[in-house]
Image: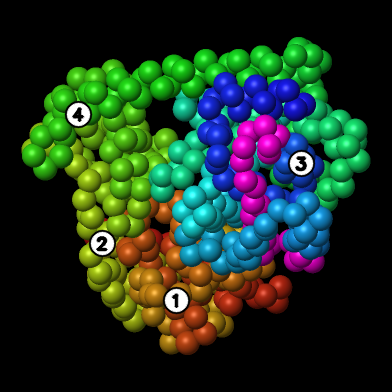
């Protein structure tokens, strides 16, 4: 394995002579083998070594065990170790993103801080197997060309720091063999075998099945990813040239952008948005491209960032979502309550026996039915407020309404208009999400209220 690592480092110019290298150390086989390999090559490469371990605050005692292992390992090897403890679940909720993506973001943020503080190159233990699994995962998600390039051997972070992957040319089997031959101890993440996680499913079931089709599947997928990366880099370079030519006062010429082939137009939009720290979803990207082709339109990318096209200019601005939301609240009047935007909230009282006999309302009932005893007591209808929490019926969990709307992909510009039925207990019903556990009918209820919103009258 050592010759492969040396070849990878040399071929990609990963580690200049005299560098300080900080290894991202999880305690697993990959990172332990990377630390040992770089120690073995330390004099030859003329480098100094450090390590950084990140506890994500997710796995409880197991994470503390991993941290203890890393401390003991680095003490034994004489390698300075920097440990960081984070609350990734809380950060993920704040950023409205999943745990896995949030963990990845936090790791690279900490790597950047480490690199800036110590002038280090960061070395992570991604292997060829990880890269192949990433390609397959992104293919299954329907990623564009840029998403199926695999894990790059060298990556420049936005902070200017450099991340290198010296193990990117070796497989997980190579790593395990190296650890066995040298008698290296490591910890095992108990979740790695759980195929409920999609990446584990690819690792333990998809890749072994593909090996039956092609025993050299790692090599084949790596070659595909490398070619995809070269093609994507070429198209991105063309897009950068086109974007420069399209630049005008206040933004970019919509006519110039609209004349581009779709692959270049999409990359131009990505380049524009990434410059403001936003990478749009594919659906948003297509909407932005449509706005350019149509000569007008606007797409809210985040709550505070909008891609807009008007009067021949494509630009990014804060959009209407950056303005304070206009709060409203009206007293609920049965059977019809007019909302400030002109829509009407209709309350229909339903006999459960009749409804199930006719099957007319079954689908809506399961999600929306409210207890008659609660719904008629001093209720009102309003839009959202800061700090609102909602316990959706049947989910068994209470969430911040803001996080629920983020998780479900409700466009930012629509959130302020969603109607909520409330009383002193809290939110009883949320438009688009249905009833709360607070107002869910009991088994003894024979009649329920079904709220529905009709169009403007």
200 versus 354 height, above or below: above
- Name the element at disc 4: helix
- Name the element at disc 1: loop
User: Which dot marks residue 322?
Assistant: 2
Going 19% across and 28% down the picture, which residue do you hit?
A: 244
Picture coordinates of residue 94, whole percent (x, y): 48, 64
184 versus 383 height, above or below: above
- Who comes first in sequence, dot 4 or dot 3? 3
Q: CA distance from mark 3 to mark 2?
A: 50 Å
Mark closer to the observer (4, 1)? 4
Q: Is 150 inside the magenta-drawn segment? A: no
Return the residue at label 1.
Answer: 387
Q: CA distance from mark 4 to mark 3?
A: 46 Å
Mark 1, other Cα within 10 Å: few <14 / some 14–19 / many ≥20: few
Return the residue at label 3.
Answer: 36
The quadrant the N terminus occupies is top right
Return the residue at label 4.
Answer: 244
Mark 4, other Cα within 10 Å: few <14 / some 14–19 / many ≥20: few
- Who comes first in sequence, dot 1 or dot 2? 2
Mark closer to the observer (1, 2)? 2
Picture coordinates of residue 182, whole percent (x, y): 88, 37
Q: Which residues are magenta?
A: 41-64
Q: CA distance from mark 1 to mark 3?
A: 49 Å
Mark 3, other Cα within 10 Å: few <14 / some 14–19 / many ≥20: some
């Amino acid at each position: 394995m050592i010759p492969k690592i040396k070849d990878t480092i040399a071929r990609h110019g990963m580690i200049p002579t005299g560098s300080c290298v900080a290894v991202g150390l999880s305690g697993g086989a990959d990172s332990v083998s990377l630390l040992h390999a770089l120690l073995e090559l330390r004099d030859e490469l003329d480098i100094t070594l450090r390590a950084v371990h990140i506890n994500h605050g997710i796995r409880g005692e197991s994470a503390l065990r991993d941290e203890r292992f890393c401390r003991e390992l680095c003490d034994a090897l004489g390698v300075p170790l920097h440990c960081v403890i984070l609350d990734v679940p809380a950060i993920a909720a704040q950023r409205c993103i999943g745990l896995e993506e949030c963990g990845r973001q936090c790791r690279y943020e900490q790597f950047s801080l480490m690199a800036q503080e110590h002038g280090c190159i960061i070395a992570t233990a991604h292997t060829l197997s990880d890269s192949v699994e990433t390609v397959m995962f992104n293919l299954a998600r329907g990623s564009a060309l840029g998403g199926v390039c695999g894990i790059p051997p060298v990556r420049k972070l936005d902070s200017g720091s450099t991340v290198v992957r010296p193990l990117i040319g070796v497989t997980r089997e190579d790593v395990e063999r190296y650890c066995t031959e040298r008698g290296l101890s490591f910890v095992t993440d108990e979740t790695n075998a759980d195929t409920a996680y999609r990446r584990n499913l690819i690792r333990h079931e998809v890749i072994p099945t593909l090996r039956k089709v092609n025993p050299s599947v790692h090599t084949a997928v790596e070659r595909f990813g490398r070619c995809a990366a070269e093609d994507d880099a070429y198209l991105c370079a063309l897009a950068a040239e086109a974007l420069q030519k399209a630049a005008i006062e206040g933004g970019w010429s919509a006519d110039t952008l609209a004349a581009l082939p779709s692959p270049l137009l999409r990359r131009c939009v990505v380049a524009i948005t990434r410059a403001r720290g936003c990478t749009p979803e594919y659906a948003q990207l297509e909407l932005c491209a449509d706005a350019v082709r149509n000569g007008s339109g606007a797409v809210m990318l985040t709550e505070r960032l909008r891609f807009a096209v008007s009067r021949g200019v494509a630009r990014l601005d804060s959009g209407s979502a950056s303005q304070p939301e206009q709060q409203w609240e009206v007293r609920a009047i049965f059977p019809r309550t007019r909302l400030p935007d002109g829509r009407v909230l209709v309350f229909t009282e339903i006999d459960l026996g009749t409804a199930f006999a006719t099957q007319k309302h079954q689908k809506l009932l399961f999600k929306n039915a409210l207890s008659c005893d609660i719904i008629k007591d001093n209720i009102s209808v309003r839009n959202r407020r800061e700090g609102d929490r909602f316990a959706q019926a049947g989910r068994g969990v209470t969430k911040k309404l803001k996080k629920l709307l983020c998780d479900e992909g409700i466009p930012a510009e629509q959130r302020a208009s969603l109607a909520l039925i409330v009383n002193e207990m809290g939110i009883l019903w949320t438009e688009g999400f249905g009833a709360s556990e607070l107002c869910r009918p009991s088994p003894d209820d024979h009649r329920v209220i079904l709220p529905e919103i009709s169009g403007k009258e």
